[in-house]
Amino acid sequence: MEMDIIDVKEKPPLDSTPLTLVIGKFDGVHKGHQLILQVAREKMDSSQETLAVMGFSDQPLWVLRQDEAYEKKITPDRDKFTLLKQYGVGRYYRVAFTKEYAATTAEAFVKEHLAQLQVKRIVIGEGFRFGKGASSSTDALIRLCTERNIEVVVVPLVKINGTPISSTKIRGLLKEGLMEAAQSLLGRPFTVTGIVVHGQKMGRKLGFPTINMGEMEAFVEPKPGVYLGVVGIYKDGVITDYRDVLISAGYRPSVNGQGYLIEAHILNYSGDLYDQTVSVSFLRYLREEIKFTNLDDLIEQMEQDRIQAEQLLATD
């Protein structure tokens, strides 16, 4: 299934396609988002309707407040679009969120922006806010949409241990290296996708060849350290092979690394993956990033990491 991606700078382009429209940032496409998409699919009453999502190009708290905690995404667009397609989304409106757009009133959003589209129903999560200063609630949306004969469906929040699942919570877990907890909220491991590029080949020289991730969109960076994970190897646009990996995420202080980098050592594998698309999934934090005074100590620790990973995975 293909998904149309429509970039919106001001108002959506005029379109007569019948839509069930989901509105939200969908950063992470976590279990709460998944429920909203499920309900939206169930509410569609015609095979002629298209399930559409309207989201923002950037997190509003980054655009409006320059809050660095929201500068990067849990799920970059490439990965988010892949997930949304899997949930049956046929169209994505990527709204360029700017300070000017943030000044759009609730009334203008419904009567001018949504009026460009043939919206049959809108599906949103409980607690949805919109309009200038996020000053309008679901009640306002229902009132404005009722005037235009648009049904509004409000989906209850999904909670874990009484606490609503949120992208903000997931960001915090990733920054602490709590991958199992993040996975319980996401409904899948935290994953980043990129192209395998040539690096300094330091790992190969040390006896631990790694794949280096390039051509990646900005993403929330997990706590620096070594992780147990899985790499998915793409062929013709789909993952056809999974391999267990040790992931080094961070600044590589022992080899004077520059900038945050993700490298993955594939266990018991000797193939060439250069220029191939791969997805690296983080499963478990093993240890913090250490600056070793010599390469022999680094090699010894890497060997211990491999032994621990194989024991955890029961890998031959």
Image (cartoon, rainbow, N blue to C red):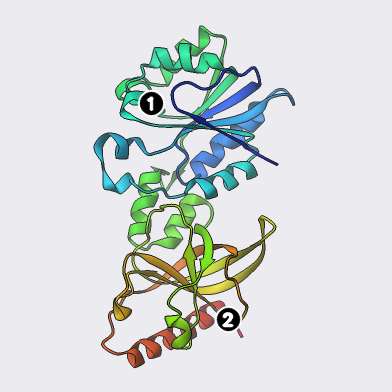
Q: Mark 2: which secondary structure?
A: loop
Q: Residue at x 56, y 67 (%)?
A: 231
Decide which of 195, 47 is in the foreground and name it: 195
Q: Residue at x 73, y 24 (%)?
A: 48
Q: Position of residue 253 (x, y in %)?
A: 29, 76
Q: Position of residue 247 (x, y in %)?
A: 45, 72
Decide which of 160, 281 is in the foreground and name it: 281
Vertical arrangement, residue 309 with respect to residue 102, above or below: below
Three-letter code, disc 1: Arg
Q: Which residue is mark 2?
A: 314
Q: Residues within 10 Å of mark 2 (few under 14, many from 20)?
A: few
Q: Residue at x 36, y 56 (%)?
A: 173
Q: Residue at x 45, y 71 (%)?
A: 263
Q: Is residue 2 left or right of residue 56?
A: right
Q: How many marks?
A: 2
The part of the image, by quadrant, that contains residue 105 is top left
Q: Mark 1: which secondary structure?
A: loop
Q: Which residue is mark 1?
A: 129
